[in-house]
Amino acid sequence: AQSVTQLDSQVPVFEEAPVELRCNYSSSVSVYLFWYVQYPNQGLQLLLKYLSGSTLVKGINGFEAEFNKSQTSFHLRKPSVHISDTAEYFCAVHTGKLIFGQGTTLQVKP
Amino acid sequence: GAVVSQHPSRVICKSGTSVKIECRSLDFQATTMFWYRQFPKKSLMLMATSNEGSKATYEQGVEKDKFLINHASLTLSTLTVTSAHPEDSSFYICSAVTGFQETQYFGPGTRLLVL
């Protein structure tokens, strides 16, 4: 069975510092991988996705993620965060349907 | 592009009543729509998959008679929570896909509170 594990439930970071949100997945077949962001009381917005090709994927708002097949990881990174990046971030794997991780709360402090 | 709307954004109802939530794809035709439920501080749980013109496919443990889903057109799916109870209070989110089904576009969600 496919599953997604987000290793950190909360990540506090100061403004302008770099951040990495970790995601590992388990699947016996090829997967498509996604990162979504959810602001309070809102739906999910697609940040970026990996379908095939280059393992380094660039998304919106300065985020990027790297697909590592050998480590079954798809970590999300941003070199310098803003206060406005404070939100819930979900990693998801698609193998017929979307399976979400438990989410990571990114708290950007001034 | 790829905008999905939901209506209402928030609804409060009395226990025992039914509530209908609409999900619309505004600028594309959605062959498939999904309904999710999200509890506070929790991830999204897929409730059902809805294909236009056919019956919805429900996930294990989701009561199909309680959560009625209709997908009558390529731009509209509805979720009706029948005989709602306080435990049905939650944040309901829909998503839609076009031909490239691996990318889902999400609506803004509907907050349901059953008193």
Image (cartoon, helix red, strand yellow):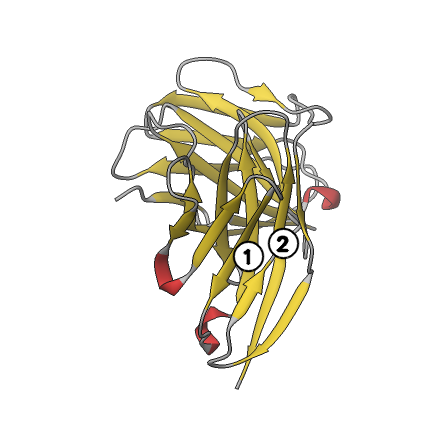
Q: If you read the primary sequence from the N terminus, does the residue marked by circle 2 or circle 1 appear first?
A: 1
> On the rendered structure, is B114 left or right of A43?
right
Identity of the residue drawn at 46% across and 74% down: A81
Label 2 resides on the chain identified as A
Which residue: 65% across, 25% down?
B59
Residue at 56% from the left image edge and 60% from the top image edge: A88
Between A94 and B25, the one lying in front of the other is: A94
**SS assignment at label 1:** strand
Q: Nearer the viewer, residue B13 or A7?
A: A7
Tell which subunit mark 1 falls on.
A
- Residue B19 visible in the shown view: no
Q: Residue A103 — which label?
A: 2
For disc 1, the marked residue is: A89
Q: Quadrant of residue B105?
A: top left
* B61 over A40 or under it: above or below: above
Q: Please report contact status of discs 2 and 1: CB closer than 8 Å, yes or no.
A: yes
Looking at the image, the residue that sits furthest to the front is A70
Q: Position of residue B88 (x, y in %)?
A: 69, 42
